[in-house]
């Protein structure tokens, strides 16, 4: 057994006492910035004051205010206690004094920027850390606390320095904490992989475009990033004015009046009194829309792995999107496009066709756009497609893998998502989880800007226009991992042209 006294380590802010999980060191609820409460609401995260003595790091920190029922239903579990004081992170490490520094993987949870926490069961870093990496999961501000614009708040900044993307700044502050402190946990501050799913994946892409995040991480994994456009600042300001009016405040309300509103009053607000599930473009954090930055070749020069799942349309119900209705609207407005889509897909049931079209427009097209943008600036990009469904649950998922279904395979935490009574995970399921988590660790350990392939059970070449290779997970019982050339090439070419008009809530 490892020496229990080694549970105490010293960070730049003070001493921490963690715990052991088998042979792994675990530190929970570590603050990475000052609590963003009171006068610090809707301000950039501030430096943390060092503490005296030993700080307990054996319990999860609070999550941002959110809808608990929604998180239980769609977010991965119970996020625990809520508070505006939510800027905490967690670390799993196999060795705090390794012979050479270990790769670091920093996880940004999803949930539409409105639900979730780094402490949820599917995100436990134990299995990844056991493979020789340091895993960090974080909480950050959500909902109106994470993204907000109002003229009186914007007026607090000098011209050109306005902040509306507080959640992205929280993530940047967490990465700065990692740069300061991760060597104390055995991590390599020169090999940081940022990875996330859904809005966490959008965060990875956004930070690839933020001038404030440059140099803080060295590669990224993007799981199921959606193609909804960022919200322009002017639109975000209008929403902020409507929110103030909803609470009985005049258009010229003071910043102190806004900050005095009770925290718990915000999370129940839905559109049109809420932003998202995307960042705001036009502030100092994200000066230009994320996708426009990639298309212009101005993203940070870091390797990226990106992919999506075979039934991403499963999440559209939570956004109130009826895929069949969207398809029928297209048929009424542009019958030629509708006929072309039917011909490309060869699907004649509008419900099934609408689900496939919504999936591809909202999710499948993004990986292709990003790997092409990477290729254009000479940076490696790897594209994957996740279509694996647990052997004893395939009747429950007739259209394929749902949005988020890859997460317990990535973290190798299948038991965190119980199957219905009478069903269990098979040996093939566990083997797939081991393969995927190993591949993610391989990327974190080995991928560099000079990589041309990832070596492993299957050698995975970087995406190039002349090979157009996608790594497929599942979908073929004989070959659950296989390389597929020219995957969806025809339909995604069409959707690149149509995306602007079709992808919207």
Image (tube, helix red, strand yellow):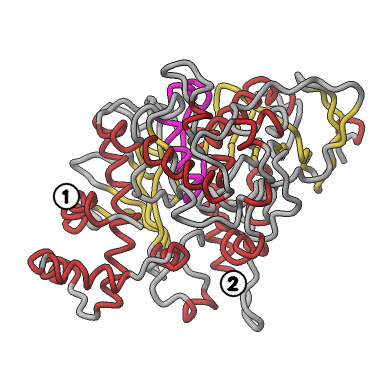
- In reply to whether residue 199 is colored magenta, the answer given is yes
- In reply to whether residue 47 is colored magenta, the answer given is no
Classify the position of the N terminus by image quarter. top right
In the image, is residue 84 above or below residue 430? above
The extreme bottom residue here reads 422
Q: Quadrant of residue 32?
A: top right
- Measured in 3D between alpha carbons, the distance from the residue under mark 2 to the one under mark 1, in whole angstroms, is 42 Å
- As rendered, which of 73 and 135 lies closer to the eye? 73
Classify the position of the C terminus by image quarter. bottom left
- In the image: residue 419, left or right of residue 292: right
Report the residue at 56% width, 28% height from top: 172
- As rendered, which of 304 and 66 lies closer to the eye? 66
The spot of residue 428 in percent (x, y) is 54, 68
Residue picked out by circle 2: 426
Q: Quadrant of residue 52?
A: top right
In the image, is residue 272 above or below residue 178? below
Residues rendered magenta in the picture: 195-221
Residue 479 makes an appearance in the image: no
The spot of residue 379 in percent (x, y) is 33, 29
- In the image: residue 126, left or right of residue 144: right
Q: How crowded is the residue under tag 1: few (<14 C-alpha within 10 Å), some, or many (20+)?
A: few
Q: Quadrant of residue 409?
A: bottom right
SS at mark 1 in the image: helix
Report the residue at 49% width, 38% height from top: 251
- In the image: residue 480, left or right of residue 62: left
């Amino acid at each position: 057994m490892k020496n229990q006294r080694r549970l105490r380590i010293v960070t730049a802010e003070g001493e921490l006492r963690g715990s052991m999980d088998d042979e792994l060191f675990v530190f929970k609820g570590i603050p990475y910035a000052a609590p963003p409460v009171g006068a610090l609401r809707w301000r950039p995260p501030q430096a943390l004051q060092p503490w005296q003595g030993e700080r307990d790091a054996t319990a999860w920190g609070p999550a941002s205010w959110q809808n608990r029922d929604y998180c239980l239903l769609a977010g991965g579990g119970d996020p625990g206690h809520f508070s505006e004081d939510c800027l905490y992170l967690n670390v799993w490490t196999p060795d705090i004094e390794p012979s050479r520094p270990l790769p670091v993987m920093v996880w940004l949870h999803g949930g539409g920027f409105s639900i979730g926490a780094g402490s949820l069961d599917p995100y436990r870093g134990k299995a990844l850390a056991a493979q020789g990496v340091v895993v960090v999961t974080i909480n950050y501000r959500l909902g109106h606390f994470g993204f907000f614009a109002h003229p009186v708040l914007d007026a607090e900044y000098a011209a050109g320095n306005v902040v509306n993307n507080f959640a992205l700044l929280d993530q940047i502050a967490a990465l700065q904490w990692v740069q300061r402190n991760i060597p104390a946990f055995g991590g390599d501050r020169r090999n940081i992989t940022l990875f996330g799913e859904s809005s966490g994946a959008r965060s990875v892409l956004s930070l690839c475009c933020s001038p404030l995040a440059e140099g803080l991480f060295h590669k990224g994994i993007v799981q199921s990033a959606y193609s909804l456009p960022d919200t322009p600042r002017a639109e975000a300001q209008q929403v902020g004015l409507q929110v103030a009016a909803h609470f009985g405040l005049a258009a010229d309300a003071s910043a102190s009046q806004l900050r005095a509103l009770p925290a718990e009053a915000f999370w129940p607000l839905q559109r049109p009194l809420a932003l998202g599930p995307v960042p705001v473009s036009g502030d100092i954090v994200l000066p230009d829309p994320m996708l426009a930055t990639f298309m212009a070749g101005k993203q940070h020069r870091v390797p990226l792995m990106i992919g999506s799942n075979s039934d991403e349309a499963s999440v559209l119900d939570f956004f109130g999107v009826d895929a069949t209705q969207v398809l029928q609207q297209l048929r009424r407005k542009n019958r030629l496009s509708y006929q072309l889509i039917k011909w490309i897909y060869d699907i004649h049931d509008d419900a099934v066709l609408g689900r496939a079209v919504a999936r591809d427009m909202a999710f499948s097209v993004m990986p292709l756009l990003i790997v092409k943008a990477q290729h254009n600036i000479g940076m490696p990009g790897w594209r994957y497609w996740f279509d694996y469904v647990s052997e004893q649950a395939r009747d429950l998922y007739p259209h394929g893998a749902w949005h988020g279904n890859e997460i317990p395979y990535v973290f190798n935490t299948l038991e965190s998502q119980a199957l219905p009574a009478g069903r269990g995970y098979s040996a093939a399921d566990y083997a797939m989880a081991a393969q995927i988590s190993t591949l993610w660790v391989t990327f974190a350990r080995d991928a560099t800007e000079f990589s041309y392939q990832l070596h492993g059970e299957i050698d995975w070449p970087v995406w190039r226009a002349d090979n157009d290779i996608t790594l497929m997970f599942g979908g073929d019982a004989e070959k659950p991992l296989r390389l597929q050339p020219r995957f969806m090439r025809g339909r995604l070419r069409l959707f690149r042209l149509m995306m602007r008009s079709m992808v919207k809530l």
